[in-house]
Amino acid sequence: MSATSSQELEQAPPRMSSRLEGELMEVSLGPQHPSTHGVFRMNVALEGEIVRKLKPVFGYLHRNHEQIGESAGYLQAMPYTDRLDYFCSMTNNWAYALSVEKLAGIEVPERAEYLRIILAELTRLQNHTSLLGFLLSDMGAWGTPLMYAFREREKILDLFESLSGARMMCDYMRFGGCRVDANDDWIAGAKKIVDLFPKFLDEFEDLILQNEIVIARTQHVGKLSPELAISAGITGPMLRASGVNYDIRKIDKYGFYPRFKFRVPLGDHGDTYDRLMMRALEMRESLSILQQAFAQIQPGPVMNPKVKIRAFKPPVGEAYGRIEAPKGELGFYLISDGSANPYRYRVRPPSFINLTILEDMCLGHTVADVMVILGSIDIVMGEVDR
Amino acid sequence: MIGAGIAKGMAVTLRNFVGSYLEEDRLTTVQYPEERNPLPENYRNFPILIFDGNDPHAGLRCVACKICEKECPPQCIYITKSEDKKPDYMGKPQFYPAVFDIDISVCMSCQICVEVCPFEAIKMDKEFELSKRERFNALLERKEQLAKSNEYYHHIHPVEAAQVDKNLAEAAAAAEAKKKAAAAATTAKASSVGDAVSVPGKPAASPTAQSLGSTSSPGVSPPAAN
Ligand code: SF4
Ligand code: SF4
């Protein structure tokens, strides 16, 4: 009985859409799928379990960020940048402040530069920590690694809260410095967390990096060749995992990064495991930058007193400021016509541009691998859709 | 050996599990609402209006200059200037807001209104348990709900409030000294009313310099008023 019915099924005319000719099955992953990192949809065409075609669909979280930036003033756009990549509001603030400072030729006091580096590296720590947790939960290690990662992340967010007033929507930096100063208690608290962080990293590496399941799920999965990565404009840890030595902290020498000694980890294979390791190694380097910053920071003003907060009008011109955000190159391109609003306000988001390569990395892998590959790209939909 | 990595990971899990009963830094959850973590000094949520003394109407520092309304990024402040003037703390007639509403469902707690206010009139609250049963009017905070006393401000942001009081006292002193120099006869009645707090009729500094000063926090000395 069952034999005949299966035979009948085989002979039945294909019921799929004519486009796919019944050989492939089209599945929509997301936008409410629990492991797609926000409202993101992937239309995948499957042959059995193997992905043959993948079309990313985004735009569900579009909120007109660039248009808001153009119609609000320069200062008014600052709190909106928090909402781009809501994991890393400090680095978003910095990138935006940097481009406005370039546009208007504003100097930043020394202490503010140090605070910015401290906050950017703390942001990198918490972003990479939570990325590792999410990646593991994409692989099926539900809960446990993510909770350990969030426990550590929360300590850093508490630091942000006590400095800026909010855990995630920090809105901390201003053109020409930082909004408030960090007192000695804060610096001591931050130093304590940074001192204890290697202990957590050791433990976390014990937890995952030698795990046979993690290795089987990530090695040789989602390979990205350096040539493709460069031609697609990939930046950040993803590019470096493919072995391309490109770190804007080293290349642009913005802020006080030339004063710091740190290495840029590079991957060999460009697979998911390399991307995972890349984050772990970058955190070690961030910790060393932080320790140097705590040793070097001196008291002083944190705000350039010449900068007007209200009715800020930069001269006519254009500027592109970029920084090495935890996810890659984050840049703001501003054109000023001399009025209180930018004539053009453009965000160059790392998540969005890194995501464009998704199909090339996923073809030939299984559905379960697609989730892991997506997780290793490290996207935040707030930044992809803007 | 296959399985060694998994065993190692399991050991970490076990250590964390046992540790959560013994070690403080592995047990991080708090049983809200019975237990609460203290909020940091700089915590901010939604804006409030500060008044001096006991009368929310008479002591309100806001002079309805509408700067915050203009600068608020999502435009969630609505102000109507009064027709008449009321004497402020120094006895100088000033406008006051007849209507001052903040739509807290739109407000994004960015603190820009606080930074731009030249009169130290608007500050950030720390109250975060604000759930309401009604969707519309309950989320529109009126002047009456927004007005909070200076004592309350001292209670929630002690260091910042002390700094603000100092700034205001300095500004008042500077204004008074100026006045004294100009006309020695009229100084007698302008002596300050409050003990710790005294609000100048007009800010001694230019609004810009003052607004920079208002962003100061523990550890920063305010920029000199010029
Ligand atoms: S800026 Fe200050 S004084 Fe002016 S309207 Fe707003 S709260 Fe009132
Ligand atoms: S905190 Fe920001 S959004 Fe809220 S009222 Fe003030 S300026 Fe507007």
Image: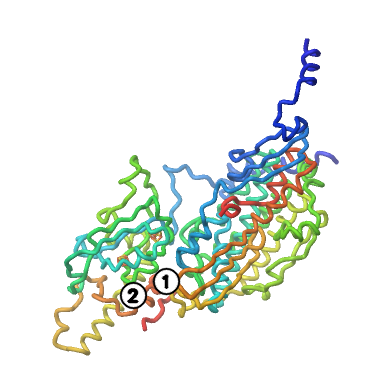
Q: Earlier in the sequence, mark 1 or mark 2?
A: 2
Residue drawn where x is 56% and y is 77% of the image: A110
Residue type at mark 1: give it: Ser
Q: Quadrant of the N terminus of chain A?
A: top right
Answer few, some or many: residues within 10 Å of disc 1's Cα (few below 14, many 20 plus, some between 14 and 19). many
Residue drawn where x is 29% and y is 62% of the image: B50
Q: Quadrant of the C terminus of chain A?
A: bottom right
The secondary element bearing badge 1 is classed as loop
Q: Which mark is residue A201?
A: none
Q: Which residue is mark 2?
A: B167
User: B181 above or below B175?
Assistant: below
Chain identifier of the residue bearing label 1 in the image? B
Residue that extends furthest to the right in the rendered view of this protein:
B1
Residue type at mark 2: give it: Asn
Q: Which residue is mark 1?
A: B216
On the same chain, marks 1 and 2? The answer is yes
Residue B149 as seen in the image, left or right of residue A278: left
x then y, percent, for residue A11: 80, 20
Closer-to-camera residue (A368/A231) = A231
User: A327 above or below A145?
Assistant: below
Task: Write down which quadrant ligand 2 falls in.
Answer: bottom left
Residue drawn where x is 31% and y is 70% of the image: B119
